[in-house]
Image (cartoon, grey):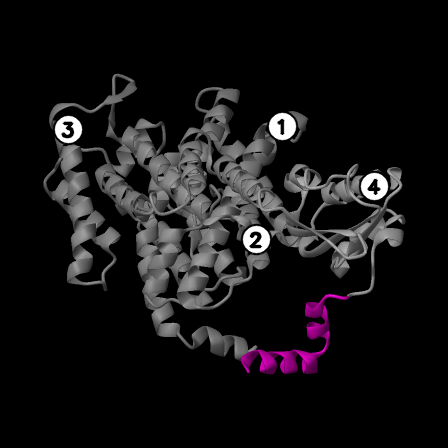
Amino acid sequence: MTDFIRKQTANAKNDILSGLTVALALVPEAVAFAFVAGVDPLVGLYAAFMIGFITAVFGGRPGMISGATGALAVVMVALVAEGNAMGSEGENLGLYYLFATVILMGIIQMLAGFLKLGKFIRLIPHPVMMGFVNGLAIVIFLSQLKMFMTFENGAFVWMQGPKLFIMIGLVLLTMGIMLGLPKLTKKLPEALIAILVVSAIVIFGKLDVATVGSFIRDGGGEGLKGGLPQFQFDIFSKVPFNLQTIKFIFPYAIILAAIGLIESLMTLNLVDELTETRGDTNRECLAQGGANIVTGFFGGMGGCAMIGQSLINIKGGGRGRLSGIVAALALLIFILFASGLIEQVPIAALVGVMFMVVIGTFAWSSFRILNKIPVSDVIVLVAVSALTVMFDLAIAVISGVIMSALVFSWENAKRIRARKRMREDGTKVYEIWGPLFFGSIIAFNEKFDVKNDPEKVEIDFVESRISDHSAIEAIFNLVNKYEDEGKSIKLKHLSEDCKILLYKSNPKFTEVIVEDIDDPRYHLAENPEAFTKGLSEYKL
């Protein structure tokens, strides 16, 4: 226990200051993401607090910040809308379906942790990751365009005239402050300063613009009333626990769980690289899942790791769990005592912040490398970005991984080679080069001339590996073809794991596999003295 406390307080000053900075920056983003999802801003703030606190304490990556994110919010829009359509007007049933979905999402994420699936994040290729962040940036940008609408005559219409120009001017001012302030000083949180400046201009200038409070009231809400998160007993009365509900929320829960884990584990890898340390992916899955279960029961919209906020924390010196804990507790203080001030924040300021998030999220380097990487990688990158915009991040990433896997399989399938030679005793030897798997089976079979080959044939696998069941079947069929022609066939230099696969598949292979190793490379590996002697002779 003493060692744990010592580790957490070793960087206490930097963790506390960095945590406070992150908390200030979390407020506008949590509110903005709640708008994206179509729920009350307080739902986003509660999620940021609860998820941030739980993952800071129990997560697998100290220093990483979690909360409500745009990647999840863009999926929740359809969920909330469909849920609201199931109930009567003003019942707000979609919100309770959202809570139930977030709880199921957390359960799925915890199962991923228990099954130790976090390690599979390594299977996501870099082009897929670039397409992922590019698509996310585009989706967030498109979601902000609806903020350029105003509520008139009972409906939302596009702004025109002076209102539009004022909106654009305030958005550009917010972005300008966030771009320029870091050049003057990096000690102040640029997002918060930009919001304070723009809010002061609107309040003291008495500008007639949309604010958080007016936006909530136009949407039928009663304003932002801060307080401690309350257990949502209404979930059990408003959301029926039956097969129909499961059918409705399960697809959303799967998508949200996948997006949450993908983004969290990608952020974890990024923080690992920046800090030159190693996080625990499976522990992070468990913590993210547990946090979402709790936030669902206590009225939060769910969330995952936040790339932008995590970078702010790391660059600010936050390295330990204390930074995340301070950020979460400070955010709760803002909710309890500053909710009235949040209502006065102009929507334009939040849109400006989100546009800066878009600029920071988009991988602009992808344009520079388009002509420097393989065409297949370019296709994957563009496809993932497009699928993210058209569908969602989970479908896009899974599709990108499948496309990359197919390209990899095709490229390796073309590498199968067979060198043919005859021994003095009349034995024909096929030396196989390249991986033998489902993609290379046809090319492998084309290498052999069963009818015209001599009575004795050897297949040498010294530079090849048997990778799957398709390869085993191909070898078994080839052996049968030679034996049906009355010819002798032997398999040589199979690795131990390949021999185990073949022996398990069919006892017949014990008759054709040669166990004796007569290749000089094997002898050198088994006899270090011979290897050293051979190396010295080579140098001479």
6 relative position to 100: left or right: left
- Gap between marks 2 and 3, in whole Å? 45 Å
Query: Residue 28 at x, y = what percent?
Result: 31, 46
Label 3, secondary structure: give it: helix
Residue 43 visible in the picture: no
- Which residue, given by chain and number where applicable, does mark 3 sit on? 163
Mark toward the start of the polypeptide (1 vs 2): 1
- Of badges 3 and 4, the one in the foreground is 4
Residue drawn at x 13%, y 33% as measured from the top left: 166
Q: Are marks 2 and 3 in contact (CB under 8 Å)?
A: no
Q: Amino acid at mark 2?
A: Cys
In the drawing, what numbered circle is on residue 444?
none
Q: Are marks 1 and 4 in contact (CB under 8 Å)?
A: no
Please tell me whether the stretch drawn in magenta is mainly helix, strand or loop: helix
Q: Quadrant of the C terminus?
A: bottom right
Label 1, secondary structure: give it: helix
- Which residue, given by chain and number where applicable, does mark 1 sit on? 247
Q: Amino acid at mark 3?
A: Lys
Q: Quadrant of the N terminus?
A: bottom right
Residue drawn at x 73%, y 74% as measured from the top left: 526
- Which residue, given by chain and number where applicable, does mark 4 sit on? 482
- Of badges 1 and 2, the one in the foreground is 2
- Of badges 4 and 2, the one in the foreground is 4
Query: Residue 487 at x, y = what percent?
Result: 86, 44
425 relative position to 177: left or right: right
> Are there few (<14), some (14-19), or many (20+) residues within 10 Å of tag 1?
few
166 relative position to 4: left or right: left
